[in-house]
Image (cartoon, rainbow, N blue to C red):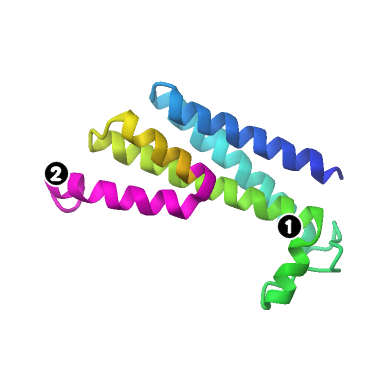
Amino acid sequence: MDWGLIFNSVNLLALIAWAALIFLPRWPALLSAILYIGIGLLCLIYMAGLGSVLTGLVPTDSGGADFTTIEGVRAIFASDVGVTIGWTHYLAFDLFVGLWIARDADGKFISRIIQAPILLMTFVAGPAGLLVWLMVREPAARAQGRWN
């Protein structure tokens, strides 16, 4: 299996989904496409890759998956298949968080100009973008009522 091709494909899929999320109008059909085609497909690729490694169908350079030690995780990521699976995991979760941020921000009437750099930060450095959004959203959430 060409893990380099899969790696490049998931990157392209995520890049297209992020560009749509940041730059295109947020029509319900577009948001559904990002959720089910973008995130869903990334999740499916992740599950297929992880399943193939855990069952031994695709060997890693380390001989197997071991998530219980730092050495075991390092060994997983020392292979192309491990890097591709791990990267796909990041891409799927960061895009899911980005979609939530965009929907939450739209619901709080936060300008797309303010959203764009936060979404870009989430794309590049997931948890950092999420943290910035949580700090930006708090005043808007309080203004709308605590549970919005």
Q: Is residue 70 magenta?
A: no
Residue 144 marker: 2
Q: Main secondary structure of the magenta part?
A: helix
Q: Label 2 sits on what residue type?
A: Gln
Q: Is 104 left or right of 100, judged from the image as shown?
A: left
Q: Is 60 left or right of 116, judged from the image as shown?
A: right
Q: Is residue 132 magenta?
A: yes
Callout 2: SS? helix
For label 1, the residue is: 51
Residue 56 point in image, percent of width and height: 84, 63
The correct choice, above or below, for 112 with respect to 6 in the image is above
Residue at x 81%, y 58% (from the top left corner): 79
Residue at x 87%, y 45% (from the top left corner): 1
Residue 125 point in image, percent of width and height: 51, 50
- Location of residue 40 by image quarter: top right
| Mark 2 and mark 1: Cα distance apart in space | 44 Å
Residue 134 point in image, percent of width and height: 31, 52
Q: Which residues are magenta?
A: 123-148
Along the line of sight, the residue nearer the viewer: 79 or 55 = 79
